[in-house]
Image (tube, rainbow, N blue to C red):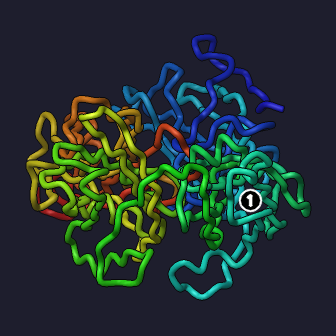
Amino acid sequence: MDIALAPQSPRQPRQLDRLNIPGMKQNVIGYDGGVGLWLLTYGLTVVVDRNWLASPGDVINIVRMPDMLQLATLMLKEGDEAANHYFFSIEHKNLPDGEVRLGYVVHFKEGGEAASYTLSVLVKTDLPGGRNNNPPFPGVGHSELKFTLSTTIIDPPDAIRGVTVTVAPYPNMHARDMIHFSWASVLIIQQVAGVGRETVFNISRDQLMEGGDGTDLLVGFLLVDQVGNTSTDRSADTKVQVNLDSTRLEGPAIITDGPVDTIDIERLNGEDLLIEMHNSAAIAPAGSLYDIDFRSYPPNGGVIVHRDFERVITAGRTVTHNVPYGVVRAAAGGRVEIKYVLRKQNPAVDLYSRITVAKVFGSIVRLEAPYFAEYPGHTVHPIPNSALVSIPYYPWRQAQDKLTLIMRYVRGLNDVVVFSESKLVGDSWPEGAPVQRLIYRQDLERFDGYKPYLYYVVEPRIVEGSTPELNESLRQLVQIGLPVSADR
């Protein structure tokens, strides 16, 4: 039921547009959207678009229905009537799990009021899988996420039947949770069978072939709920052996001073990762080309692809390749997979390798904070007509990624000043170069005298789940204009 309307001025609309929540999960069945735990960490930001003839003295009240609890309020000051958007911060304690219906009422200075349509959101802060009770050791995985496979050695006869996966029930299970199961490079997304029930599904022959051959391929899963929360960790990985193509060459070798099948970020110490390809002179004559495919898989989903080529100069000798440190670093807490195609010229033929897999140990990499490019001290003064913001490069960046640049300052209880702009990365930025955005004077002046946080949020083209560690950059504290207490 929408908010009841009081008599109002004829020049005001009878009902106002709904408020919106930046970052809200779309397509949540039964609701207008979903709000996960990560959106509530610093208080939930809500936005009211100006869709009435505003005047100084108008009061906007954000309310929760049906109890009409007032969550935030703002009285428009001189100049506010020209703003296109008004921002508010709602405390987590006022947003209990379950359906929350939000709206706002505008009380006009000249008398009367108008109310908005209602926004119905599912608030969910319990993480699928619940608490991980395993010790924080690399590769241990989430204590509550368990699965079994019908076989771990797959030869051609087994591939015809496929492999059956059985995922056990887990804490905080919901009927619309999705299992994101990784079989080597293949991602299978499967809805759970029901609360308290085992979920059983099959890895088909085609999926097994797409995943490729390898001696120690890693398979496992994470959970994503309907509002975008992910399990705090992945399941422990199970190693499988796949032998479907006897013509495949041996996979690349990873050259480190650590244990086999592992990469320790600390041991790399900022240096590139060395890999080697070796085949006999008969198989890899001079002039042959190694087409290298290196894939990093961060722990909570996504993939970073590094593709490069190395030519065989002397037949029979080992060929080496350096994988950029940043590409490997991005997979900390996850895994990498390496394979190649040996492209021969005479006779013209392509030979495919098996896959080499390694776990990557180290702390999860955070996105670097954005910064004002022309203000190394992070103080923007005097306020210019526009200021250039650089969003640092990250190795898994794609042209289709949506970057939302945010500047946010909480002025008082529920009173927040926000600049927010979302755009796709696009294809005009060279690899390794930052994405640059302009913030204009009219937006900067709203923060005059304040010290807001500057940061950005990445929404990948394929969104699995949302966590601050992977989707949100570190926050840079910046000063806009002189501090309020300074003598102006």
Residue at 60% over, 45% down: 209
Q: Residue 73: give x, y in percent of width and height.
A: 56, 47
Report the quarter where the N terminus lies. Answer: top right
Residue indicated by mark 1: 96
Instruction: Give the camera-side residue of 89 and 300.
Output: 300
For residue 131, side relative to residue 438 (left or right)? right
Residue at 9% over, 58% down: 376
Residue at 36% over, 78% down: 264
Instruction: Give the camera-side residue of 124 and 326.
Output: 326
Q: Residue 62: give x, y in percent of width and height.
A: 62, 43
Q: Dividing the picture into quarters, in which one does residue 398 lie?
A: top left
186 to 377, vertically: above or below: above
308 to 127, vertically: above or below: above
Residue at 42% over, 76% down: 262
Instruction: Give the camera-side residue of 358 and 279.
Output: 279
Residue found at the very far front of the displayed protein: 282
Report the quarter where the C terminus lies. Answer: bottom left
Would you say residue 89 is visible in this rendering? no
Q: Which amino acid does label 1 sit on?
A: Pro
